[in-house]
Amino acid sequence: MGMSNVSDIFGSNVFSDAVMRERLPKKVYAELKKTIEGREDLNPMVAEVVANAMKEWALEKGATHYSHWFQPMTGITAEKHDAFISAPHSDGKVLEEFSGKELIKGEPDASSFPSGGLRATFEARGYTAWDCTSPAFVKEDAAGVILCIPTAFCSYTGEALDKKTPLLRSMEALNAQALRILRLFGNTTSKRVTPSVGAEQEYFLVNREKYLQRKDLVFTGRTLFGAMPPKGQEMDDHYFGAILERVGAYMKDVNEELWKLGVSAKTQHNEVAPAQHELAPIYSTANVAVDHNQLVMETLKKVAMRHGLTCLLHEKPFKGVNGSGKHNNWSIVTDDGINMLDPGVTPHENIQFLLVLACILKAVDIHADLLRESAADVGNEHRLGANEAPPAIISVFLGEQLEDVISQLISTGEATHSKQGGTLKTGVSSLPDLVKDATDRNRTSPFAFTGNKFEFRMVGSRDSIGEANVVLNAVVAEAFAEAADILEKSEDFEMAVHDLIKEYLADHQRIIFNGNGYAEAWVEEAQRRGLPNIRSMVDAIPALVTEKAVKLYERFGIYTSAELQSRAEIQYDTYAKAVNIEARTMIDMAGKQIIPAVIKAVKALADSMASVAAACPEADVSVQKELLLETSAYLSETKVALAALQEAASKASAVREENACQAAHMCHDLVMPAMEDLRAPVDHLEMIVDKSMWPMPSYGDLMFEV
Ligand code: ADP
Ligand code: MG
């Protein structure tokens, strides 16, 4: 694409509100808007007209196919393409067709997607249903131009089989309960409350040719072997560093693709680790943000290939180097623009804000296990709690100003003032003095208040942000509901709300932590406070099916108990499968690439000793001998560890079909340690074997030669 302004291309591939207003008859547009805003069910006649307009628009864009685009439990998106053609007429011609029925409902084969047991008990059929709250778009790729229709994916009996259905349900719950809070404070004008979400996405870029030479990256997305290069990230010279030309060209291309799709890619910069970068869009409504984050991930990967690069979205592609995550920025906003998380300049006087804050603290404290679970994915296992990402312990960072207001409230029952930020003097007359925020940043907190939003920082870089937002919406809806239940009945509202805020803050203040989340002292302190420290995904999964979770989700119709059971099952199974693939990849690499290469290296050393000794008996061959001994020792250690890993992996995979939970635990307890045991001697070998004989690119090759 040539030179163009952002405003020219932005949203050009989206069947947006503006396009609909232009192309739909006034009445149809108005009716559809009512459905989008949740005020009316979809009228089939409306769907028919919308489908036709959508088709005409897509055909003008060159589309040949349409696809119901959905988000099954695999964590990525799925699509099945159908051509817009009708059966040929007698004259052999075909027409482009797309009906309202085809827009509203699709029927992909549900049996190929994870259902966690729902399939065994119910029907194999699955349906996709149009989500008219997220705009349709056309996607241009190798398969041609495709009209993509965002959809929810459900079973024959209505169980959610995807990440979108529960999200939409949780947004309904939050809307209903947040409106109750607003009404209590005399707001009669706001009609709808929605969560706003902005997801910052981290990723690595590596040279594609080198990537293809590493089976571990190809099969698992992360390196399973690899010694640290002489230079790591210790110089901190990459973070916010100047962007390399090749990477810059890539980012430009990514932005243009995303803008066309209506994704408002806004900021980009280099991240902490070499070859690591970040992209953040401007926030939008939660379900659109979830869809857009999927498009961001897909686009990052697709465009990389065009530039001879590969984008690694794995949470921990390189051991010993910072991993990647996602910061899920979340706030609650009304249709008339009120952000319920905006404290104003003097938060101590903002009673509605203090109630909202107290409810959120309560919700996060009570459901810390669910939040932790929502960020559990196989790759994040290597990251959370590893002094680079938030710890596995959930706590809330509020910053100086709010912490001070809260301690006034708890100690005296009255908050009389709010600390202010003041001015930052630069000391240089030509530079402006800056108005300081009332609160500094804290990078180590998993759940940080950042001005007018909360930032949940635990989500993995490869994961969908869907679940995290389901949990946030649901737990806060519950806290709002409980507060409203009490306050709606109160005789003296002022007094009751004051008492309730104080009670919630006093009861749940243990969740507030403004210190360094990476410090060992915090782990001990958190334990004293009774906060859960759930280190592994396998230990996080049970949070889905506790009595507390079932009660929460059933109350708001977000998940049924059966849906929760199925999700837990899928998580265990996913974990076991992923670890199994990693183990098999290591076994393959060690057996077919590494051990044979080391044997050659040993032979070369032995040959060298023999030929030197033959040529010159008095020459010193002690270096070769020492290396030969060392290499041989690591080689036999490798062989022993390989056999042990084979045994552990086959034990775990033998039980997977029968019992995914047991298999997942075996993967965690037996297979992962065996993988570490195999990796250790191989990484030593990489350091001493002639580089030209090592069968794959090194960490240095991958990270410093993009
Ligand atoms: P940071 O200071 O962490 O870089 P930014 O202000 O750049 O934060 O925002 C990071 C992300 O948060 C962006 O995607 C941004 O659009 C989003 N964001 C900003 N304000 C809000 C809000 N009120 N609600 C939700 N997301 C928001
Ligand atoms: Mg951030």
Image (cartoon, rainbow, N blue to C red):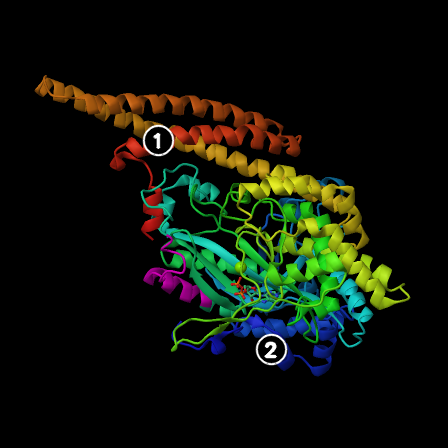
Question: Which residue position is annotated with label 1?
Answer: 684
Identify residue type, mark 1: His
Instruction: Tell me the magenta residue range.
Output: 236-255
Q: Is residue 347 visible?
A: yes
- Residue 689 percent location from the top left of the image: 28, 31
Q: Residue at x 52, y 48 (%)?
A: 389
- Position of the N terminus by quadrant: bottom left
**Structural crowding at the residue carrying mark 2, measured as other residues with C-alpha within 10 Å and reported as few (<14), some (14–19) or many (≥20):** some
- The answer to whether residue 444 is left or right of residue 110 is left
Question: Which residue position is annotated with label 2?
Answer: 19
- The answer to whether residue 625 is left or right of residue 706 is left
Is the C-beta separation of discs 2 and 1 under 8 Å? no
Figure check: 645 above or below 367: above
Closer to the camera, 329 or 26?
329
Closer to the camera, 270 or 518?
518
User: In which quadrant of the rendered view does residue 32 lie?
Assistant: bottom right
User: In which quadrant of the rendered view does residue 148 lie?
Assistant: bottom right
Closer to the camera, 703 or 31?
703
- Ligand 1 is within 8 Å of the C-beta of the residue at disc 2: no
Q: CA distance from mark 2 to mark 1?
A: 60 Å
Disc 1 element: helix
**Residue 245 is a magenta residue:** yes
- Residue 680 percent location from the top left of the image: 41, 30
